């Protein structure tokens, strides 16, 4: 099956973030394979009985076209890519319309699986409690003095001296941490008073992670060395690990499980549809 130019363009954008005309030979071969697969799925879905009577929202086509257009730097680049792909805006809109209809058919098929109710969701919750645990998070600030042997003030010994001078000032006036970060930190977070934000274990450099998660709330660390340089950390707040009660997650869990059930049902239907269509495609 020869792939539609739109399917090739979409595959190129999805796989490589560029128009089909700029693809290398091996990239184009992969894009063509993906495009043929998309074309086969589209043909099978739109010729199915489930496609009858499916309609699109009034603005769906414009939104889809706008999303494609937004991937290009400007209108000239967009139209040039269409030209190189053998498309114009009318052909693009028709291809998008068919693609949106495919999505609508799959949504219709998936919806037949039915919604997940609270009782079923509650059973899932109590049999998968570990999935709902919220890990400990700590809100932190830091001050960084980088190490760079090319600059006198950032050679290792001088950088350490500078951070220890800041630490001494903060030991006397700990409420000045944000001010000192703004004045002296060499991290982009300086403009926000050194605010790193709320982090979980394992999100920072190991040395910083160990120091932060050993601090009581409101306390400052000693000088910590990482591959970036020397740091001072302050733990602003601790949100301890917790397990939300079912009522807190019930609504979102019902929605998530319903969406998952819908996807599984649509995938199962599509697999069977393609299997039945295979002899016709091969012929």
Image: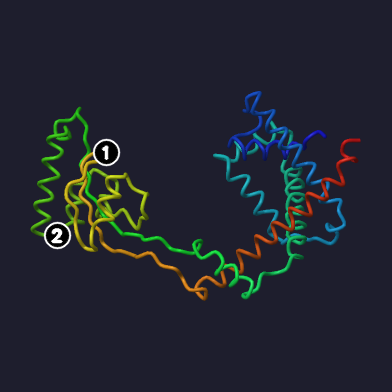
**Quarter-of-image position of residue 225:** top left
Residue assigned mark 2: 174
In depth, the one of 244 and 270 nearer the eye is: 244
**Quarter-of-image position of residue 118:** bottom right
**Quarter-of-image position of residue 52:** bottom right
Q: In the image, what residue occupies the spot 23% across and 56% down?
A: 234
Binning the other alpha carbons within 10 Å of mark 1 as few (below 14), some (14 to 19) or many (20 upward) gives few
- Residue 250 vertical position relative to residue 202 in the rendered view, above or below: below
Q: In the image, what residue occupies the spot 22% across and 49% down?
A: 143
How far across and down, in percent of the image, does residue 266 sit? 74, 56
How far across and down, in percent of the image, does residue 37 sit? 75, 39
- Residue 157 vertical position relative to residue 173 in the rendered view, above or below: above
* Side (left or right) of 182 relative to 35: left
Q: CA distance from mark 2 to mark 1?
A: 24 Å
Residue assigned mark 1: 228
Tag shown at residue 55: none
Helix, strand, or loop for circle 1? loop
How far across and down, in percent of the image, does residue 67 sit? 61, 49
Q: In the image, what residue occupies the spot 12% across and 42% down?
A: 162
In depth, the one of 76 and 182 nearer the eye is: 182
Q: In the image, what residue occupies the spot 23% across and 58% down?
A: 215
Quadrant location, the C terminus: top right
Quadrant location, the N terminus: top right
């Amino acid at each position: 099956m020869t792939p539609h130019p739109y399917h090739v363009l979409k595959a190129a954008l999805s796989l490589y973030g560029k128009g089909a005309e700029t693809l290398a030979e091996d990239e184009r071969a992969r894009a063509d394979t993906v495009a043929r697969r998309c074309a086969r799925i589209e043909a099978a879905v739109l010729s199915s009985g489930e496609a009858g009577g499916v309609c699109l929202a009034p603005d769906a086509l414009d939104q889809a076209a706008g999303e494609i257009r937004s991937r290009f730097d400007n209108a000239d680049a967009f139209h040039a890519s269409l030209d190189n792909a053998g498309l114009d805006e009318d052909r693009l809109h028709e291809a998008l319309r068919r693609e949106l209809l495919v999505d609508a058919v799959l949504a219709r098929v998936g919806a037949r699986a039915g919604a997940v109710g609270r009782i079923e969701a509650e059973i899932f919750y109590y049999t998968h409690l570990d999935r709902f645990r919220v890990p400990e998070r700590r809100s932190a600030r830091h001050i960084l003095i980088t190490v760079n042997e090319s600059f006198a003030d950032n050679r290792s010994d001088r950088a350490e001296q500078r951070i220890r001078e800041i630490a001494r000032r903060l030991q006397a006036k700990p409420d000045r941490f944000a001010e000192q970060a703004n004045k002296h930190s060499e991290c982009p977070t300086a403009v926000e008073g050194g605010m790193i934000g709320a982090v979980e274990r394992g999100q920072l450099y190991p040395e910083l992670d160990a120091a932060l998660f050993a601090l009581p709330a409101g306390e400052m660390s000693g000088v910590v060395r990482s591959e970036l340089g020397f740091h001072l950390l302050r733990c602003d707040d601790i949100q301890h690990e917790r397990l939300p009660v079912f009522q807190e997650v019930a609504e979102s869990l019902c929605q998530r499980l319903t969406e998952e059930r819908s996807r599984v049902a649509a995938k199962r239907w599509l697999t069977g549809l393609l299997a039945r269509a295979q002899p016709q495609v091969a012929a």
